[in-house]
Image (spheres, rainbow, N blue to C red):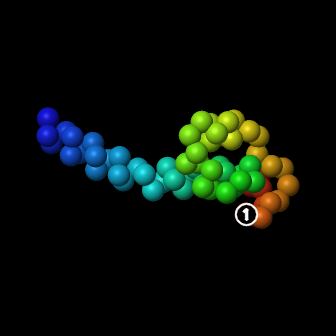
Amino acid sequence: LLGFTILSSLFQLAMLCPLLGIGARRMHDIGKSGWFQIIPFYNLYLWAQPGQKEANKWGNPVE
């Protein structure tokens, strides 16, 4: 049981950086700062918004 807990914790830690990167890219896609992903419940609302069709300060949209 202790081994599973340690393994699970290591896996969660290893997944933290990629998940934060994905979240920041999604926030940039809708024209918001990546820091908006840490606001509870508001970030869920933002994730449901459509991406911007035009360029914003984070770059051009990917087709």
Residue plotted at (74% across, 39% down): 49
**Most foreground residue, 56 or 44:** 44
Q: Identify the residue under disc 1.
A: 58
Is 47 drawn above or below residue 33 in the view shown?
Answer: above
Q: Residue furthest left?
A: 2
Q: Position of residue 20 (x, y in %)?
A: 51, 53
Within 10 Å of the Cα at label 1, are there few (<14), some (14-19), or many (20+) other Cα atoms?
some
Whether residue 25 sits left or right of residue 55 in the image: it is left
Whether residue 16 sits left or right of residue 57 in the image: it is left
Q: Position of residue 19 (x, y in %)?
A: 49, 49
Q: How many marks?
A: 1
Residue plotted at (27% across, 42% down): 8
Rendered image quadrant of residue 41: top right
Whether residue 2 sits left or right of residue 25 in the image: it is left
Q: Position of residue 56 (x, y in %)?
A: 80, 60
Whether residue 16 sits left or right of residue 4 in the image: it is right
Q: Check disc 1 and report its element: helix, strand or loop.
A: loop
- For the N terminus, the quadrant is top left
Residue plotted at (35% across, 46% down): 12
Give the residue type at disc 1.
Answer: Trp
Residue plotted at (21% across, 40% down): 5
Q: Position of residue 59 (x, y in %)?
A: 75, 64
